Image (cartoon, grey):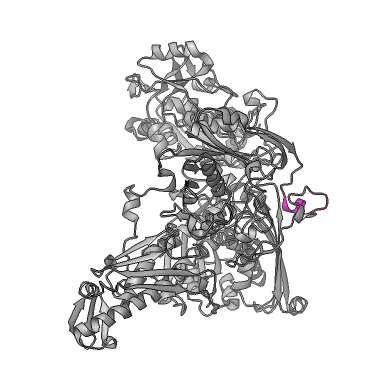
Amino acid sequence: MKKFTHINAATVEEAVSVLSEYKERAKVIAGGTDLLGAMKDEIGLKYPEVLVNIKTIPDMDYIREEAGVLKIGALALLSDIAGDSTVKEKYTALAQAAHAVGIPQTRYMGTIGGNLCQEVRCLYFRKPKNRFFCFRKGGALCHAVPGENRYNAILGGAVCFAVCPSDTAIPLGALNATVVTNKRSIPVLDFFEVLGNVLEADEIVMEVQVPEPKSGTKQAFLKFRLRKAIDFAISSVASAITVEAGTVTDVRIVLGGVAPVPYRAVAAEDALKGNIITESVAEAAGAAAVKDAVPLSQNVYLVQITKTLVKRAILA
Amino acid sequence: MSEEFISVGKNVPRIGALEKATGKVAFTAERKLPRMLYAKILRSPHAHAKIIDIDTSKAEALPGVNATLTYKDIPGRIGDLDVPKRMFGRHGGHYILEDKVRFVGDEVAAVAATSVEIAERALELIDVQYQVLPAVFDPEEAMKPGAPILYEEYAPNNIAQSMPCQDGYTGHIGGPVVGGHGDMEEGFKEADFIIEHSVNTQRSSNIPNEHRSCLCDWDGDKLTVWEASQGPFVLQRVLAWLLGDMPYQKVRVISPYVGGGFGNRHMCYRHSPITALLSKKAGRPVLLELTYSEELIGFARGRWPTIGSARFGVKEDGTLTAMSCKWIQDAGAYLEANPGSSTAGALIKSYVCPNKEWECITAYTNLPTTGSMRSVGGAQGCVLPETTMEKVAITLGMDPYDLRLKNAQGTSYEGLEKGAEIIGWKERWHRPGEGPTYEGSKKRGLGMACTQTWQMGGGYGSSVVTVTINLDGTVDLHHGTVDLGTSSITSIAQICAEELGVRFEDVAAYWGDTTYPFDEKITASRSLQSGGNAAVRAAAKAKQKLLQVAAPMLEVEPEDLEAKNSEIFVRENPERKVSFADVALKTKNEQIITVGHRIVEKVPIPFSLCGHFLEVEVDTETGGVELLRYVCAHDVGRAINPNIIYGQIQGGIVQGISFGTTEELIYDKASGVPLSESGIEFKLLTRLDFPDVEITLVEILDPNGPFGAKGCGEPPTVCPNSAINNAIYNAIGIQLGESPYTPDKILNALGKI
């Protein structure tokens, strides 16, 4: 691994000032489960000169409810989120997603901030030493399109077909969460972009806020993968469905693993709204979720899996 | 069955287990020598290229760099076609370093520096001029006229040719295998049905836990090598030869603990002479440790992909009249082992049929190397005949279990019968696709596959064990084998204790060093049988000598005595006894040291069919496969240490399940660049992905095995892929044509995509 300078930040201000100084030559480190691997493999165009360690900032790992809002500090561990009784009870899909990340070791190190900010796992992007100068790295093309694309995007792919690997972003999207940075509050689905996220060079994630779901809201998180541990989602879905007097009054369905960003399946939501949930309604919503899918040469199977997951999440 | 024994058949704790679990054992890469340097290897970015020139001057100028190595440093390009005959683990590639590269990851140059980081930086400063050549990534394409040629000697079709070994140790390697017996035309004429079937298997990798490491240290003209090897003596003799016909006594290989190998440590491979030469050039000890990715791809000696097609003739009553299996195999850029005969082995051994033919052709391609991986071709070779048998049974309207039993070869089918009974085959098996549906979309299926247990009673390499009776009556056992993780050394010590009549805890075992007596290597499930037989002989001789010393002490003849629990007593009057310690003290002028040889001899191998049975649940909406139950009944001969055997069988099956369900080395079809670089992309199963394997031991004694024991390291790995294919067929009613059996293939078969 190449050398870098490691700075322990005592406060958010200090972290931000280092970031302001070094800009794209610096990176934030918390759990490091994604970043250090990427650095060892020398992924990315600029090897960071400086890592700003934010784990040394006190009181940023809280999980608490305040006035109907769940507030999670950026440094809260995935294992703590997965095991927190309030999260498990009221924000179930988030607890399930946190538990579905990686392996126990990564959940004990990984933070929610890091889970949202991690880099994609595209086989071409992740090939060590930037072997493939792909679109995401400033190149002219996506190598996955003519190549191995079994784990690439079927929805919303445009020039880059890598998928958002975050598990927690999916239920956070379904639960209409907000990402709070040192500069602003951003709805979680607006936080992501095809080539990364909207964070500016001197901006760090400080907190995630999740509004308490309305009573009568049913949540689900389903993750499909080849192995029950380690693997990122091949396809995942999170849903939050509010049923009043038998009919769906409010619904948010977000797909993971199949698009460059957490993908809000608006058509599936529309298929549910105002309806009574039945097997056929759920099935129709599943089909609607993938109606805009444009699969690549190897990943047409993801359409079938995603459709099924959406149906099952609705019926769960 | 083993009640009459004291040590044999007992679950004594594995020798070295506590030391491993408490971190006291130093694996190769954990060793540090004074002034030690760290080596790194530069690997080819191209799938096929000629190296026009290579300039290491900038790398050498980097402070901290002590030595570099390229093909230019290899005197007279060591080796010619003779090299593979000497078990240099790269058939096809004959040089330690060469001016040609044949796959992305092939070795180009090496550096030794004062730190890993400096060595890595130095690699970037090596200036290599490549002339990129056209590459080929498909064995069928490689065999066509006009395909890029990897080796002039295998032009024009890249087909690996047989090379007899002339090193006096081993048989032949490589080459197409065409064989058979009977009259195929007649066989198909007699048949009521002719069933054709084809199925392919994928490229896999051994990836043991301990990454490959080598530490070399020269003292004058004497070289000491620490390396986790399956065959320290192979490494010794090949290194001695590669480094200029050194006397064997000048090359000492030390291999105390080996963090798994699964077949990819049984020869001398390029990295060992590279490390030795760097160390010689630098005049300092050099440690090379490969990364996970290098182990997975650059070093891979995993399963060669197979393209299989079969044609079976069968009578209405299920009698096989003709069996024909043909495979085309992808060797990758280099090759070791016998890709033809190993793949064809399953067809040859499992079923009786008067007319059989097999053909196995292996072609070189510009992809990572393949070779020996636990059962060497057995797991690939089993898939074609075993899935064809399934198709035959269904075509005839027969239960596949009955079809197998009807045609089974061997003297015992106990393994088959017990397994079927445990899983409830007869009550629960249904015709493919005709079972009930669970939870709206899930179909369950039972599947099975057979393999012969094999044991190297008939050949392959000798073993020598010495037994030393210390003057206090304790026993030292010296053996040139290694502890591969199979714990054969524990079992061999149990055998020694039993034969000698000494308490197991009084036996100390020493192994993993070429200064100990010779052992060929750990391979082909041979170590327990071979080393065990040598131990029996050495122990029997030592016991005889002890009895001779004890006889006058007890005033009887040696024939009247017996030894048990470190005591020697009069058979007719067990109260009259002396301890080993008392007897041993009398040998202080003439210490008892005996030698036991296990000699290579051709003896008939008793066939015994083993059955693997499993139940899967296929989600027909997602293509997901869940393993619900896995039952296997394995013939292991005498179970010397049942817990060790359970570990071997469980581990072998999990590795086989992984091969059937998720493992695959993926590469970019345009450039040949491997894409499964880490444990995230190369999907070895974890504990959550398979059920407890229900293991039943069948003990049909091998008259040539020590106390009747058979080897069991490899056979468990053979069946799982085939059994999973058959179980999925049973669940969904469609046979899959290529492993691993991933959701995309299942959904495709179901017409869902």
- Vertically, is B512 above or below B747? below
User: Can residue B687 be seen by looking at this rendering?
Assistant: yes
Residue range highlighted in magenta: B137-147
Q: Residue at x 63, y 40 (%)?
A: B70
- Pick whichever, B548 or B673, lies toward us: B548
State the residue in front, A212 or B730: B730
Residue B202 picture location, percent across and down:
63, 52
Magenta stretch containing residue B141, yes or no? yes
The residue depicted at 71 percent of the width and 42 percent of the height is B48
Q: Report x, y in % for residue B691.
A: 44, 55
Residue B702: % across, % down: 46, 77
Q: Nearer the viewer, residue A108 or B732?
A: A108
- Position of A72 relative to B571 (above/below): above
Determine the main secondary structure of the stretch shown in magenta: loop
In reply to whether residue B242 is colored magenta, the answer given is no
Q: Position of residue B37 (x, y in %)?
A: 47, 38
Q: Residue furthest front?
A: B220
